[in-house]
Amino acid sequence: MNTNKIIPLEKRMKDNIKNYRLNHLFVLDVLGSRLKHMAELLDVDILLTDRHGEKEVVIGDFLGFEPDVVNEPGRKIRVSGRTIGHLYIKADRVPEDRKVFTDEVLDGEVTLLSTLAEERYMRRETTFYVEEVESYYNKDEIRISDNEDILTGTLNRTYFDGRIKVLERSEIVPIAVINININDWKYANDHFGDNQSDRLIQIVASIVMEEAKPDYIVGRYDGDVFCVLVPMPEEGEAEEYCKRIQQKCDAYEDECLSPSVACGIVYKTNLEERIKDKISDAEYEMFENKFQIKNAPGYKERLTRAE
């Protein structure tokens, strides 16, 4: 039996909200359009900030205005007992006889946003919790071959597709979708045989997994193709991950093999988008990167040095 303790759901919900930002619970472009429409109807200016006062959506004139979320927090958007956003309103143009109505509408909007964010947060964390519980009780009963690719130790295609379904049920955005393809794997197979070309796949797989963070979902999607899903990445995180992989492959020293990979990155930012479609888009980006790499000075010399 797995000895790692499962964190109770109640504690998980209380603790994990501190890691969430507004863009983890809302599609900011969609929310911005909604707030813009409301600002036009009410004839007010609206500013939405994150919990620290960083401006996320600005509608109207807030030039020179610096939010003070401690002393003047505006209207708070709260989830699981914590503030995740602040709504500031400038209502100078609103007539006196409409101010009560305007305040009621704005208060109702904040309540609605807090409720929607709370529900989305609950769905995500509950899904992750259920998955952890199932893993906890079933881990010793599941053969490694049921979810791992035998050659590389990454997730196999079937289990990887299952994780995609879990992510989509969890309504997580954004998600970085990365396609990683080994450059000239066929060359290694033609010149050095099946054993060495399999070893090339293993070398690349080990680098891909070593550079991945624990929450990355890494799968062998095809013979020499890996897919990586990064839920809720920080800005530039996926790009830096691919950069590290490529640098580590280029620096790898071997008597005959010359590991090299091309990477394509796209983002799922909308709940209506399907991850499978994004994998296809990432493949297109990967081919663009592959063209650049294979035409770069020194690539062919490194590839053929063992001939």
Image (spheres, helix red, strand yellow):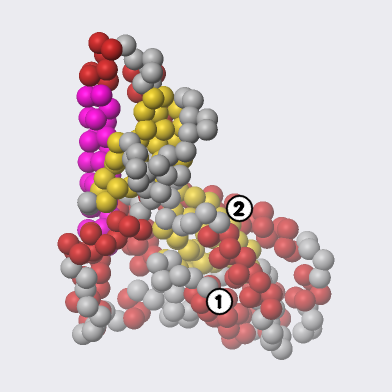
Q: Quadrant of residue 261?
A: bottom right
Residue 221, position as x, y percentages in the image: 48, 65
The residue that label 1 is drawn on is 207
Residue 44, position as x, y percentages in the image: 38, 21
Q: Amino acid at mark 2?
A: Glu
Q: Give whichever of 93, 31 is nearer the camera.
A: 93
Q: Give whichever of 146, 278 is nearer the camera.
A: 278
Q: Amino acid at mark 1?
A: Ile
Would residue 157 be visible to someone looking at this image? no
Q: Give whichever of 301, 235 is nearer the camera.
A: 235
Q: Quadrant of residue 179?
A: bottom right
Of pointers 2 and 1, the one earlier in the residue sequence: 1
Q: Give whichever of 301, 117 is nearer the camera.
A: 117
How many other residues sit within 10 Å of disc 1, few (<14), some (14-19) or many (≥20)? some
Residue 282, position as x, y percentages in the image: 55, 54
Q: Residue at x 38, y 15 (%)?
A: 93
Identify the magenta region: 103-128
Q: Is residue 234 above or below residue 211?
A: above
Q: CA distance from mark 2 to mark 1?
A: 21 Å
The residue that label 2 is drawn on is 285
Left or right for 252, reference 47: right
Q: Secondary structure at mark 1?
A: helix
Q: Secondary structure at mark 2?
A: helix
Is residue 122 shown in magenta?
yes
Please state which of the two labelled residues, at mark 2 or mark 1, is closer to the viewer: 1
Q: Is residue 259 above or below residue 262?
A: below
Q: Is residue 125 above or below residue 255?
A: above
For the stretch drawn in magenta, the main secondary structure is: helix
